[in-house]
Amino acid sequence: MVRELLKKLSDAHGVSGSEGNVIDVVRKELKGHVDEMYTDSMGNLVTVKKGGEFKVMLAAHADEIGLAVKSIDDKGFIRFVTLGGFYPPTLYSQRVILQGTKGKVTGVLGGKPVHKMDDEEKKKGIKIDDMFIDIGATGKEDAENLGIEIGTPVTIDRELTDLANGRVTGKAFDNRAGVAMLIRTMQQVKSRHTVYGVFTVQEEVGLKGARTSAYALSPDCAIATDVTFPGDHPGLDQKDVPVEMGKGPIITIIDASGRGLIASRPMVKWLKKAAADKDIPVQTEVGSGGTTDATSIHLERGGIPSTTLSIPTRYIHSPVEVLDIRDIEGGVRLLVQALKSKPELGK
């Protein structure tokens, strides 16, 4: 079931540059389902289902936003840098996991107590630079003896939990939802084309793995599987964000107001036709927010026709992201159906 797969992926810990735990889950899930599987020099996991000369790249980034240890003071408190885009209030007072050299170490993100803040400090809110990690260490040497060192990766300590109506909450749905969709697609797809399922690294810090893998593979077209935020909850206006959770995966037409990806129209048409042929609910999006691996991919090798298939996900880049499992299932059905045919590129 998709829910169980997403739980394995969401509960795994893998910040940018330290995606190994997530890649291990992917390897186990795809063993025996693909013709080839290898890790490239960047750390991307490339899986292959061999077919004809036409090559399709499907990409899902395996990394999540997180932290890395920057320094340890004499009292054992840890300062850090962020890896990816955190909104500071979502970090303060969270519990975290440090991937130390001797195993996992639990910590909490601390800061100045609100009781000791003056009115101006309360108005401004706590900043990243004001926070630190407390692992209970009695000093710097104690922290180091626990396996903590400069560069130790840190992730939020959360596990996937069920909500009502087939919806779930957890960390790192950005982009373990896309990873789950790609795993299930590679398990099920039967295509006359050669299909590359690439689980990329370091997306959250610059779309890096997608760029190097697209260059190496030189596919004829590409789809990134990722998440995007819906406009179906308080604080957003649906005229600005007219996509909703539970109404199917989302095909990107434009993201980041065109600064990121302007999708290949034949690719969009191809996915929309596949959805119509099998009555799969699907949405389309012109967005002004973030971008995906497709932005890097579509600029490689003289231009690779690309789009993104996203899962609507609330509260992205927080520890309590929310999505509807049925949207992932719909995304898998859509990709499997589309890969039975071929986009009419150049038209």
Image (tube, rainbow, N blue to C red):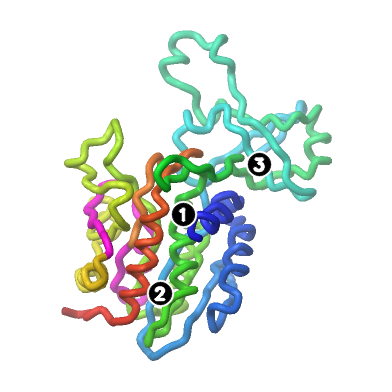
Between residue 319 and residue 211, name the one nearer to us.
319
Quarter of the image where one finds residue 301: bottom left
Query: Which residue is found at the position 39% from the left and 66% from the top?
Result: 332
The answer to whether 246 appears left or right of 76 in the picture is left
Q: Position of residue 42 (x, y in %)?
A: 56, 67
Tag 1: residue type? Asn
Which residue occupies 27% across, 54% down? 255
Query: Which residue was labeled with disc 1?
Result: 175
Q: CA distance from mark 1 to mark 3?
A: 19 Å
Residue 298 lies in the magenta-colored region: yes
Residue 57: numbered disc: 2
Amino acid at pointer 3: Ile
Q: Amino acid at mark 2?
A: Met
Number of marks in the rendered image:
3
Q: Is residue 347 visible?
A: yes
- Indicate whether residue 256 is drawn in magenta: no
Q: Are marks 2 and 3 in contact (CB under 8 Å)?
A: no
Q: Which mark is residue 97?
A: 3
Q: Earlier in the sequence, mark 2 or mark 3?
A: 2
Q: Secondary structure at mark 2?
A: strand
Can you give x and y, in whole percent of width and height, for residue 53 in the image? 38, 90
Give the residues in magenta: 280-308
